[in-house]
């Protein structure tokens, strides 16, 4: 077990966070800071004839107004992508140029055209209103199916048909053969709705200029400072690394959205350096809807082949993924390689084939959002399995149980080449049925029917394969004043890494976890890091913290041998102290660190901090899995849905802190509920104007929408890393949405409803009921 503290829940940072002591980017103050406002395009697709700045420059308080032409003259580069994809023809996906400020053309509403910098926020707003941009509008498109038509307007000449890539994986011939001999073939076309990740804290960038170092420091909420720093220095601003520092302090949620480099990072850093003044930009919520990356937005046609007994034979999927107007950092690999990792879910499917097209449209670019391709794939697959059960006469639970991969088959290689290192999917299924009290469901359904309500039960099985950037050096350093510092390149976004990482280090060193302090989010003090993404931060940091702690002990033993004047072989370490075996002579870690810092009793070459360092050496991939069961009640007169019961069981590998796991599950399921029932980014199909620009029109789940969520975790250690940890941050969003949709469709099954796309709003449900030819639901 990992180390705990007798005062449960009294972690030192809790008081700071609960009493307003957090330090978010917006909390940074500087008396001489300039304020920045971005001038954003009000049209979705247009040529820029001219940009008139004279009135803006004459506005009182305005210090400067800059356009894309100014950045180009200073040789500022385009916003790069990080993860390219190779298409079926062997060529890289189309990577159109994305200047930080639009130069010749705009391709979505909200694209930044200019920046106004002024002495006050009001002056900057007034100046931005005085910038006049002469647009020559062109036709716009908002959905992938329209964009690939022959008569569709083309966003990029280098992307004929607006297709960024066509990607395939699997054995198409084997799939065709399986379909030819199948007793049943089930087909479903489904759409995964576009959503906004919507973290509580909006994006922000504040730049400071240090004349003595000729260095710009930017503060920004991120999921890792090093990716932003590396891209700005090497790809965009062309600066030596020492001329730019990136700092992230507390972060109010990330969910993937804050992982990557945005145009605003580049522009604020450049303006700060150009003016040699502090420059401050805090994004508004309306700006977030117009410029934050959005997510999901995929339409797929899925087919499943089954034999007469209900065994799965083959799966085929063809999908179009709406990428938005530009290819964002990871956008190409999300619906392709990311989805393929979990395409078979926890099921034995002998043959599989996927074909995915990435399509450009005049919408905000999409990118990773909690799950990054896996929630979409699980939604398509789990809806398809429910339809297969309906059309073949099988019970949906029994059909799943029949096709689950047995635990004896672990490790298991899927037909698309993904390796599941460990897991017990049948046990998770049995457990979720118990936790959700499924045995009494029909009694509850009858009680609902007696009240004139519809009740449905649905579940979804899922797997996740963790990923991310496994790079960076972790350092564990002893402070002579009585604490131990952990330096790591991951970044907490509300994950409470300070708790889990301290417990891992405390377990490795045999000490009180309250002795440890986490340092993160500063490129000046941490040389490299992969950030937090792909549910892998604890896998990366936890295992490297353990290695660094072991390195610290080995270095300390050498120093202690000098201090205690004993043979190295006789020095033993236990619970924060080095001891000469068989004696009472010892020196504590903190005393040894003080002696080393002062150069006392040690050779000169031994002076310095007492520190251990390590790189991540294990496999970043792990296979967390789970099942989510949902129960809903629907008002048949209004179509309003109430989620009355949610149970989630998951295999998260070795458990560090159960409360933190439960918190991740609760948050992920809430986001999944939002996508299933409430949330949708909507564009006008004629003008490509964004219609959901605030929480008045983009519906987020509230406390009343979320039931009590029951969670239960089993711990089957991963075999891919020494601690046996599996990622947990994204898993609940993978299983949550399809479970809720399956429950909704089950409730509506008496009306002949076979499928509804998300979000299953009251209007959509009411229309589905109204369209039914049946006046009364059948008894089921």
Image (cartoon, grey):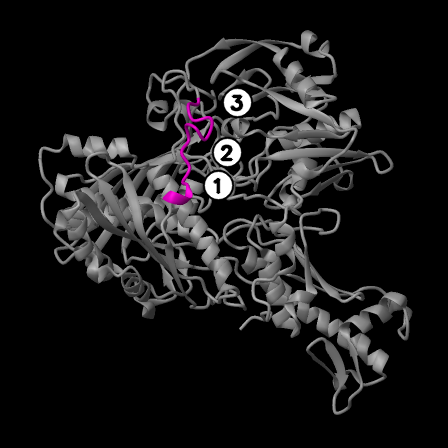
**Camera sees residue 279:** yes
Return the x and y of residue 621 as percentages of the image width and height: 48, 57
Which SS does the magenta portion mostly show? Answer: loop
**Residue picked out by circle 3:** 110
Q: Earlier in the sequence, mark 2 or mark 3?
A: 3
The residue sitting at 47% across, 20% down in the picture is 157
Which numbered marker is on residue 24?
A: none
* Labels 1 and 2 touching (C-beta < 8 A): yes
The x and y percentages for residue 629 are 30, 54
Q: Which residue is mark 1?
A: 368
* Mark 3 or mark 1, earlier in chain: 3
Q: Earlier in the sequence, mark 1 or mark 2?
A: 2
Measured as percent of width and height from the top left, residue 141 is found at 39, 20
Q: Secondary structure at mark 3?
A: loop
Nearest the camera: 329 or 627?
627
Q: Residue at x 89, y 67 (%)?
A: 598
- Crowding around mark 2 (Cα neighbors within 10 Å: few <14, some 14 to 19, many 20+) is many
Give, as a single range, the part of the protein colored magenta.
690-704
Nearer the observer, 758 or 242: 758
Q: Residues within 10 Å of mark 3 (few under 14, many from 20)?
A: many
| Picture quadrant where residue 672 is located | top left
Marks 2/3: CA–CA distance: 11 Å
Rendered view: 624 above or below 682: below
Real-space Cα distance between discs 3 and 1?
20 Å
Instruction: Name the residue carrying label 2.
Output: 293
């Amino acid at each position: 077990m990992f180390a705990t503290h007798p005062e449960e829940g009294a972690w030192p940072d809790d008081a700071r966070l609960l009493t307003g002591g957090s330090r978010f980017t917006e909390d940074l103050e500087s008396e001489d800071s300039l304020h920045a406002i971005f001038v954003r395009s009000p049209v979705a697709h247009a040529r820029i004839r001219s940009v008139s700045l004279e009135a803006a420059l004459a506005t009182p308080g305005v210090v400067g107004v800059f356009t894309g032409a100014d950045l180009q003259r200073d040789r500022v580069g385009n916003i790069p992508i990080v993860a390219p994809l190779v298409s079926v023809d062997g060529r890289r996906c189309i990577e159109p140029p994305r200047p930080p400020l639009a130069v010749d053309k705009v391709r979505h509403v909200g694209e930044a055209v200019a920046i106004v910098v002024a002495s006050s926020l009001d002056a900057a707003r007034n100046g931005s209103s005085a910038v006049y941009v002469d647009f020559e509008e062109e036709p716009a498109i908002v959905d992938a199916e329209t964009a690939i038509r022959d008569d569709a307007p083309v966003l990029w000449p280098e992307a004929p048909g607006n297709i960024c890539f066509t990607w395939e994986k699997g054995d198409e011939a084997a799939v065709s053969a399986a379909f030819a001999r199948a007793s049943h073939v089930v087909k479903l076309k489904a759409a995964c709705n576009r959503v906004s990740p919507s973290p509580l804290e909006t994006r922000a960038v504040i730049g400071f200029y240090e004349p003595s170092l000729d260095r710009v420091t930017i503060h920004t909420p991120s999921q890792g400072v090093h990716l932003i720093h590396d891209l700005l220095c090497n790809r965009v601003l062309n600066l030596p690394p020492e001329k730019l520092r990136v700092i992230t302090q507390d972060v109010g949620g990330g969910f993937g959205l804050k992982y990557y480099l945005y145009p605003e990072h580049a522009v604020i850093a450049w303006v700060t350096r150009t003016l040699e003044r502090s420059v401050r930009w805090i994004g508004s919520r309306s700006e977030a809807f117009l410029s934050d990356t959005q997510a999901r937005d995929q339409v797929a046609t899925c087919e499943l082949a089954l034999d007469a007994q209900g065994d799965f034979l083959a799966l085929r999927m063809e999908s179009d993924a709406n990428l938005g107007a530009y290819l964002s950092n990871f956008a190409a690999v999300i619906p392709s390689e990311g989805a393929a990792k979990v395409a078979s879910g926890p099921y034995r499917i002998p043959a599989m084939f996927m074909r995915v097209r990435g399509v450009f449209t005049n919408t905000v670019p999409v990118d990773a959002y909690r799950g990054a391709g896996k929630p979409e794939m699980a939604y398509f697959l789990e809806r398809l399995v429910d339809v297969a059960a309906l059309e073949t006469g099988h019970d949906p639970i029994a059909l799943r149980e029949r096709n689950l991969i047995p635990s004896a088959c672990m490790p298991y290689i899927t037909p698309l080449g993904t390796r599941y290192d460990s897991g017990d999917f049948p046990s998770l299924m049995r457990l979720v049925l118990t936790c959700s009290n499924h045995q009494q469901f029909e009694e509850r359904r009858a009680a609902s029917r007696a009240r004139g309500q519809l009740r449905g039960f649905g579940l979804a099985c899922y797997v996740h394969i963790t990923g991310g950037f496994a790079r960076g050096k972790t350092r564990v350093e002893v402070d002579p004043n009585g604490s131990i510092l952990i330096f790591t390149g991951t970044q907490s976004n509300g994950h409470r890494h300070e708790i889990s990482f301290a417990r891992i280090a405390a377990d490795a060193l045999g000490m009180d976890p309250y002795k440890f302090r986490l340092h993160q989010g500063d490129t000046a003090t941490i040389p490299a890091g992969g950030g937090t993404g792909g549910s892998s931060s604890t896998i990366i940091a936890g295992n490297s913290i353990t290695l660094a702690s072991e390195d610290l002990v080995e270095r300390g033993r050498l120093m202690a041998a000098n201090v205690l004047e004993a043979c190295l072989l006789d020095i033993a370490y236990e619970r924060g102290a080095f001891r000469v075996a068989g004696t009472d002579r010892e020196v504590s870690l903190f005393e040894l660190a003080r002696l080393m810092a002062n150069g006392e009793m040690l050779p000169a070459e031994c002076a310095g901090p007492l520190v251990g360092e390590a790189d991540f050496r294990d496999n970043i991939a792990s296979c967390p899995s789970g099942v989510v069961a949902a129960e809903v009640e629907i008002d048949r007169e209004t179509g309003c849905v109430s989620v009355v019961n949610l149970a989630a069981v998951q295999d998260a590998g070795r458990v560090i802190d159960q409360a933190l796991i439960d918190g991740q599950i609760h948050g992920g399921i809430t986001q999944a509920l939002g996508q299933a029932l409430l949330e949708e980014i909507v564009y006008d199909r004629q003008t490509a104007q964004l219609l959901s620009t605030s929480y008045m029109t983009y519906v987020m789940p509230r406390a009343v929408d979320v039931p009590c969520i029951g969670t239960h975790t089993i711990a089957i250690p991963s075999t891919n890393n020494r601690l046996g940890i599996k990622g947990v941050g994204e898993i609940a969003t993978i299983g949550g949405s399809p479970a809720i949709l399956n429950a909704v469709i089950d409730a509506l099954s008496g009306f002949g409803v076979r499928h509804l796309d998300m979000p299953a709003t009251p209007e959509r449900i009411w229309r589905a009921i109204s369209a039914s030819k049946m006046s009364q639901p059948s008894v089921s």
